[in-house]
Image (cartoon, helix red, strand yellow):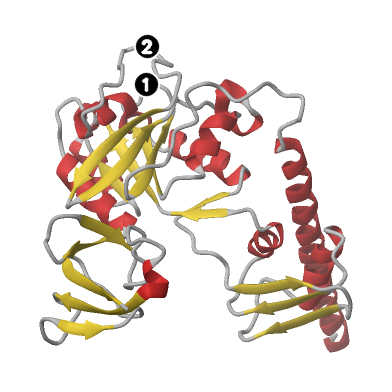
Amino acid sequence: MQFTALSLTTCCVSVISATEYHLGLLKAKLAKYRAQLLEPSKSSAAKGEGFDVMKSGDARVALIGFPSVGKSTFLSLMTSTASEAASYEFTTLTCIPGVIEYKGANIQLLDLPGIIEGAAQGKGRGRQVIAVARTADVVIMMLDATKGEVQRALLEKELESVGIRLNKSKPNIYFKPKKGGGISFNSTVTLTQCSEKLVQLILHEYKIFNAEVLFREDCSPDEFIDVIVGNRVYMPCLYVYNKIDQISMEEVDRLARRPHSVVISCGMKLNLDYLLEKLWEYLALTCIYTKKRGQCLTCCLSVLQCHRIHRSLASQFKYALVWGTSTKYSPQRVGLTHMMEHEDVIQIVKK
């Protein structure tokens, strides 16, 4: 009986392992075929008018949602741009830009036409809308609070299918194709979702037979496929539930407690200030000022990364004087690698 039990256990483990390998291979095939289906044909019509909006300001935010959820009303409330709003669907047919001025930064807000189920396949000009969304720094997913979680699930599915990963970080996997030498596989952590055999099967599906792979975290087969494809976009997303004045307080409380969620009412102008604070947090912008405190420069973290500083200054840079919370004393002489903090003042000295 002990031998029989051991044999059954071994058999079950083998079946489970074989199933996992088969599922991983199927996921690779599906990802490859889906990419081929979603690829626009060369004979397709030209781009729709109104979608070529030049990126301006310090950051870009895209408004995505189904028709008649309040995107145009939100744009009109937050910016000086008047976007047509009506009680019927598909009021907005083109991409309408506006600018939010907040804490010294100019944030470009794009009111995109409402998308429908099947947008990733091109329904309702969905491809153009999603293409613009891929260029944004943050996505605001506008949802109708009266319709529960249905809209959120459908929109996440549409964006996921075209390679937009919301509120996810890029998998910490090193992957480099080579000309020869076979597949070199290593990991610095214990893997519970992938194995060397499964990685090889997925690579072979993509006709990759020579590569170097290093897992630095426990990733799933889907995440490894994303790394291979290489065209995924990882961006933060705020789920904004509008029309909370039409639902119960219990439902408002439930929606507000969901991760990455904010509840508002454009009709009654409720909670818009808190939404702006959360948007600033998700954009992760840092404002610094020139010595004269006139012009605001929105930058990343270090002196070198300030994108408003002319590119020639990097080669002519000698040192900088910084006043603010990032220094031990004011002013402090710093180099290019100095990490700036919000509302620091900087003076750059050239050679």
- In this orientation, which residue lies closer to the viewer: 11 or 23? 23
What amino acid type should be assigned to the residue bearing mark 2?
Answer: Tyr
Q: Residues within 10 Å of mark 2 (few under 14, many from 20)?
A: few
The image shows residue 8, relative to residue 205, as above or below, that is below
173 horizontally vs 282: left or right: right
Residue at horizontal 35 percent and vertical 80 percent from the top: 337
Helix, strand or loop at mark 2: loop
Could you say which quadrant of the image residue 179 lies in? bottom right
Image x and y of residue 255, in percent: 30, 44
Residue 172 appearing in the image: yes
Total of numbered circles in the picture? Answer: 2
> How many C-alpha atoms fall within 10 Å of the one at disc 1: few (<14), some, or many (≥20)?
many
Q: What is the residue that sits farthest to the front in this orientation? A: 351
Q: Which residue does the image show at 67% across and 71% down from the upper left?
A: 193
Q: Quadrant of the N terminus?
A: bottom right
The Cα atoms of the two marked residues, 1 and 2, are separated by: 7 Å
- Disc nearer the start of the sequence (1/2): 1
Residue 11: quadrant of the picture: bottom right
- Residue 88, labelled with which disc? 2
Quarter of the figure that contains the C terminus: bottom left
Residue 231 x, y percent position in the rendering: 64, 53
Query: Mark 1 belongs to which amino acid?
Result: Ser
Q: Is residue 242 left or right of residue 129?
A: left
Residue 285 can be seen, yes or no: no
Q: Position of residue 240 (x, y in %)?
A: 32, 40
Residue 234: x and y in percent read 51, 56
Task: Give the numbered dot on residue 68.
Answer: 1
- Dot 1 falls on a residue whose secondary structure is loop
Q: Are marks 1 and 2 in contact (CB under 8 Å)?
A: yes
Q: Name the residue at 33% across, 40% down.
A: 108
- Which mark is on residue 274? none
